[in-house]
Image: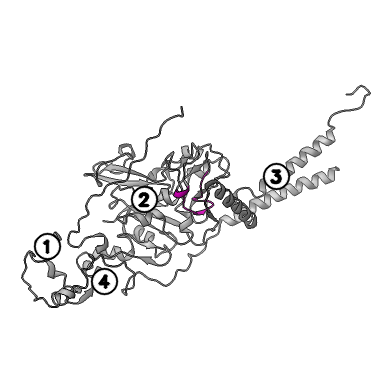
Amino acid sequence: MTRRTLTSVVVAGVAAASLCAAGVLAAAGQQSPPPAKPQVSAKAEEHLEVGPPPFTDGIFPCTACHKDLKVNRTRRVLTDMHTEIDFSHDAEHRWCLDCHDATDRDHLHLASGELVPFDESYRLCGQCHGEKFRDWRAGIHGRRTGEWNGRKKYLLCASCHNPHQPRFKPIVPKPAPVRPSGPAK
Amino acid sequence: MAANGQRTGVTRRQFTTTAAAAAAGFVMTACGPKRLHEMPKERLKVLIAEMERKYAEQYGTAIHVADTPATPGVEFAYALDISRCVGCRRCVYACVEENNQSRDPQVHWIRVFSMEKGKGVDFTEATAYYQPKEVPEEGHFYVPVACQQCRNSPCTKTCPTGATWTEPDGVVVIDYDWCIGCRCCMAACPYGARHFNWKAPGLAKEQINPATHYLGNRPRPKGVVEKCTFCIQRTRAGRYPACVEICPVGARKFGNLLDPESEIRYIIDHKRVLVLKEELNTLPKFFYFYAT
C-alpha cells in the first residue's frame, strides 16, 4: 500500500468517528411537546367511567320490596331485615335514611334532597369528604386502571370503602423475600 | 535473517500497513452499531425474530418480543403515597409475574421496607423481612423501593461496557445481551435496585408472561443484571405498570412528567413530596408523597 492510500484510510476512519460523535450529540438535545391525548377529561362533571356498585347479589333493585313497605323515618336499630349490616360510619349522628332516600330506595339522596343513583354515589360521599373527592377525581386517591395517557377506569368509593363500615381491616401480607444465601458451596 | 541473507518475517512496510488498517477498522467498528438500541431497525427485527425463536425452543411456548420505541414528549415518572401503603407486598408479586422474574433463585425488583413512625424514613432502622400476621402493623409505615430511574444515575455512568443507559422517555434500561455481569452498576446504585442472576433463572413455562419488550421483561439469561423498567412493555403501549394496577389501596401513581395535566404533576404541585437519599443528587423520577 502506498503512503497516500494509507493516509486516506486513516483520515476516512477519523472522519467517520467524528461524524458518529456529532450524530450522538445532536440527538441528545431534542425536546418535543407532550403527545396529544384523547379528549377524555376527568375534570368534567359528567359521568366518569366507574366500575359497577358493589351490590350484594339480589339486593338491587331495592324497590322490589320497598315499594310496598310503609316508610318509617324513626331513627332505630333495624331488627326485621338488613340486620347483617354492622353500622359504624359516624353511627352516633347518622343512620340509614341520611344517605338512602326514604321514598325511592333505588336512589341515594344528597343533603339538598337531590336524588343520585348508586353508580354516582361518589357525589354523596364527596359532600362530606370533599378533599378526598377532589383527589379522587384527579386520580390521586384510590386505584385506577387503564391508560396513563387515555381512558381510565375509576372505582366507586364504595368499591373499596364499605359505606356502612368504612375503616379498612388489616390484610395478610404476601411472603417476605428470602434472605440471601451467601456464597455457593 | 535466513541463511541466504534474505529478510524473513514482517517488513516495516507490511507492519505499518497492517497496523494502520487495523486501527482504521477499529475506529469504523467503534462507531458502527453495537448495542441493540443502536442497530438499524431491520437488523433489530431480525435479531428479535431470532430471540423469539430461541425462547420458543427454550420454554416451549410462543413469546412475543416488542421493540416499541419511546414516544417523543414523554418522560415517565412515578409517585407513591406512603400515607396509604399498608405493606401488603401485592406489588412485589404482581411485578414478578408481569416481568418474568426468576422464581428460584428468587428475584424481586420491588422491596418494601417497614419503618417505624417515630423514626421516619431511615433505612438504617428499616427492614424488608417483616412478616406479621396482618398489615399494617401498629406504629409502622411502609416504603416500597425499586429503581428510581434517576436523571443523574450513578449506574449508567459506571457501566464499563455501556450496557445500561437512559432511554429518551426517561427509563433506565439494560441490554441483556451486552451486559457482562460485572455488577459495577449494582455497587453504584444507592437504592439497591439492581438485581443479579447468579444462576440460570428458574422460570417455568406456565409462569411466563409472553408479552415482552426487548429492553424490559423478556426472559433473562444467567449472569446479567436486571431491574424495574417501569413495565416498559406496558407503558410504551399506553398502559399503567402492573404494580400501579394491583395496589389495593391505590398508593401508586404513574404518568408523564411533561404533561401538565397528569397525576404526577398534580401530586408535585399539591402534595408534600420527597425523594429518597436526596443528598446523593441522583435526581430520581420516583417521588414519594403524603396524600393527607
Hey, which quadrant is residue A120 in on the image?
bottom left
Between disc 3 and disc 2, whose residue precedes? 3
Q: What amino acid type should be assigned to the residue bearing mark 3?
A: Val
Provide the residue designation for mark 1: A83
Q: CA distance from mark 3 to mark 1?
A: 82 Å
In the rendered structure, which segment of residues is drawn in magenta? B205-220
**Amino acid identity at mark 4:** Glu
Q: Which residue is mark 3?
A: B27
In the image, farthest residue toward the right: B4
Q: Which residue is mark 4?
A: A120
Kind of residue indicated by mark 2: Cys
Residue at the image position 29 percent from the left and 40 percent from the top: B130
Residue B218 belongs to magenta span: yes
Residue A79's place in the image compared with B61, above or below, is below
Circle 2 or circle 1, nearest the eye: 1
Cα distance, mark 3 to mark 2? 46 Å
Classify 10 Å Cα crowding around label 3: few (below 14), some (14-19), many (20 and above): some
Position in image of residue B31 (x %, y %) = 67, 48
Number of callouts: 4
Q: Does residue B149 appear anywhere in the picture?
A: no
Discs 4, 3 touching: Cβ within 8 Å: no
Residue A1 in magenta stretch: no
Q: Secondary structure at mark 2?
A: helix
Residue for badge 2: B91
Q: Answer above or below: position of A71 versus B103.
A: below
Quarter containing the N terminus of chain A: top right
Check chain identity for marks 3 and 1: say if they share one: no
Q: Is residue A71 visible?
A: yes
Q: Position of residue B62 (x, y in %)?
A: 53, 54
Colour mapping used in the image: one colour
Q: Are marks 3 and 2 in contact (CB under 8 Å)?
A: no
